[in-house]
């Protein structure tokens, strides 16, 4: 019988449907457990794995290949479950499964806005306005994920075999629909489709070792013969191909490695339109007020400054370990590791990063301490975006002068 993947919007009761279908099929049911397994196997904090799937590319990939690596880890663990069959998976990672595994039933669960809002309000005890805000955020996460993988919207019919509207179905009815479709002849496991599932395991594992070496590529496998698709433009293609063949060819079980360029392999423009070389290219915003920092990120983007975002001190320090930003905009009052402690660690361990304090609750004493610790500037909310932009530009100028040894 078929493997079942379920993708859904928030507050569509999809978790209940997944459990119902798994119970009736006699399958295992996994969701967030996939991230727990991945975290343990690859020693990666779950928060980073969640960022890989639920965060926008601007948040995740501005600094490093962290998104590519972590998605590769998730794909590799999911591949092991798929090889065993008899599983219902609910979550974003189902979209990582290749189309040549034909015994997969791809399900999309949706619901009307009113249906979802009512469930959100009832389950979380929140207002309709808050429910709408949470739903919008979840829908944006769905959109960013499918755009990243396919360049398509999350509810595009091309991504699914069936779509179930929950405002027209009960959990029991939705479960029955899934079970009935999973039992169809076209979705039975065949030697060919099982071979594809086995090949996917090897392809996913090879993808991990390539991602760990910093390569953003697509990997497929046919009976141990690996094909690596290169979509990112490089000047020395022959050099890259040899390196990919060397890394992939050394992996156990690989018989041969073939490389080829993909449809996205195009030389970039020399410079982006109106690129401003006085602007920092690596910016990290750190604030636990999620709506504020997202809005700030969007406003900076209109000024040609894209920023990564961290929602607490621990997450910020973790991101910086992957790669240093040039400029950090840091709130003071955060749960856990507060802004002063983040600033202290940054200046001790990453002294070249310029840190701008932006806070709504700071005191004169904290301002003095922040400046003593090495903060470039101390700004208070609400801040004029032009003032912040200019301050960031000045911080970047100071960094560049230090790099070149000028005064």
Image: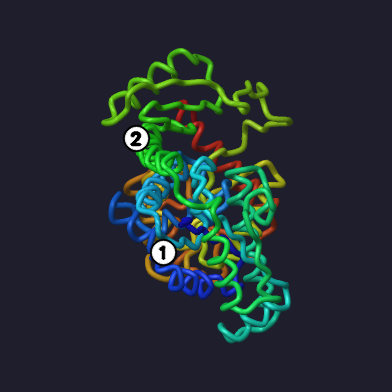
- Residue identifier under label 2: 209
Query: Does residue 352 appear anywhere in the picture?
Result: no
x and y percentages locating residue 71 in the rendered image = 45, 46
Query: Relative to 57, does residue 310 appear above or below in the rendering?
Result: below
Crowding near the residue tagged with mark 1, few <14, some 14–19, many ≥20 C-alpha atoms within 10 Å = many
Q: CA distance from mark 2 to mark 1?
A: 25 Å
x and y percentages locating residue 52 in the rendered image = 48, 51
- Residue identifier under label 1: 30
Q: Which mark is residue 253?
A: none
Q: Judge by depth and name the residue closer to the eye, 289 or 96.
A: 96
Q: Residue at x 47, y 65 (%)?
A: 332
> In this rendering, would 12 be left or right of 255?
right
Q: Residue at x 73, y 78 (%)?
A: 114
Mark 2 touching mark 1, by CB under 8 A? no
Q: Judge by depth and name the residue closer to the eye, 216 or 88.
A: 88
Residue at the outermost left position: 252
Q: Judge by depth and name the residue closer to the eye, 102 or 51.
A: 102
x and y percentages locating residue 224 in the rendered image = 36, 29
Q: Please identify, in this view, whether the residue under mark 2 or under mark 1 is nearer the observer.
A: 1
Query: Relative to 326, does residue 6 appear above or below in the rendering?
Result: below
Can you tell which quarter of the image residue 161 is in? bottom right
Query: Relative to 80, does residue 173 appear above or below in the rendering?
Result: below
Query: Does residue 250 appear anywhere in the picture?
Result: yes
Q: How is the image coloured?
A: rainbow
Query: Relative to 324, does residue 382 appear above or below in the rendering?
Result: below
Crowding near the residue tagged with mark 2, few <14, some 14–19, many ≥20 C-alpha atoms within 10 Å = some
> In this rendering, would 374 be left or right of 55?
left
The mark nearer the N terminus, 2 or 1, is: 1
Q: Residue at x 55, y 72 (%)?
A: 175
Element at badge 1? strand
């Amino acid at each position: 019988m078929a493997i079942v993947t379920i993708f859904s919007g928030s507050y569509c009761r999809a978790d209940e449907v997944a459990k119902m279908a798994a119970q009736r099929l006699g399958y295992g049911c996994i969701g967030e457990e996939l991230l727990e397994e991945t975290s343990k196997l690859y020693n990666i904090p779950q928060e980073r794995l969640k960022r890989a799937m639920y965060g926008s590319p601007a948040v995740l990939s501005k600094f490093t290949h962290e998104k590519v690596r972590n998605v590769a880890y998730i794909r590799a663990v999911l591949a092991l479950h798929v090889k065993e069959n008899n599983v219902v998976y609910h979550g974003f990672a189902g979209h990582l499964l290749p189309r040549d595994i034909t015994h997969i039933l791809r399900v999309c669960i949706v619901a009307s806005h009113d249906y979802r809002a009512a469930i959100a309000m009832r389950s979380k005890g929140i207002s309709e306005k808050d429910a709408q805000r949470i739903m919008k955020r979840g829908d944006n996460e769905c959109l960013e994920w499918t755009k990243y993988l396919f360049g398509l919207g999350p509810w595009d019919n091309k991504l699914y075999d069936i779509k179930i509207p929950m405002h027209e179905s009960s959990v029991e009815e939705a479960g029955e629909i899934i079970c009935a479709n999973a039992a169809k002849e076209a979705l039975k496991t065949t030697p060919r489709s099982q071979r594809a599932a086995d090949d996917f395991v090897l392809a996913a594992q090879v993808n991990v070792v390539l991602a760990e070496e910093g390569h953003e590529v697509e990997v497929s496998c046919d009976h141990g013969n690996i094909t690596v698709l290169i979509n990112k433009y490089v000047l020395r293609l022959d050099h890259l191909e040899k390196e990919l063949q060397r890394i992939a060819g050394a992996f156990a079980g690989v018989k041969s490695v073939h490389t080829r360029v993909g449809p996205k392999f195009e030389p970039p423009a020399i410079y982006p339109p109106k690129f401003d070389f006085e602007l920092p290219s690596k910016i990290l915003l750190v604030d636990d007020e999620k709506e504020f920092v997202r809005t700030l990120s969007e406003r900076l983007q209109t000024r040609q400054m894209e920023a990564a975002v961290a929602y607490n001190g621990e997450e910020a320090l973790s991101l910086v370990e992957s790669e240093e930003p040039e400029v950090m905009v840091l709130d003071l009052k955060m749960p856990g590791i507060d802004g002063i402690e983040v600033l202290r660690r940054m200046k001790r361990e990453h002294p070249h990063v310029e840190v701008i304090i932006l806070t709504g609750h700071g005191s004169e004493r904290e301002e003095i301490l922040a400046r003593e610790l090495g903060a470039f500037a101390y700004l208070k909310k609400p801040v004029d975006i032009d003032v912040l932009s200019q301050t960031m530009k000045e911080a970047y100028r100071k960094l560049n002068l230090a790099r070149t040894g000028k005064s």
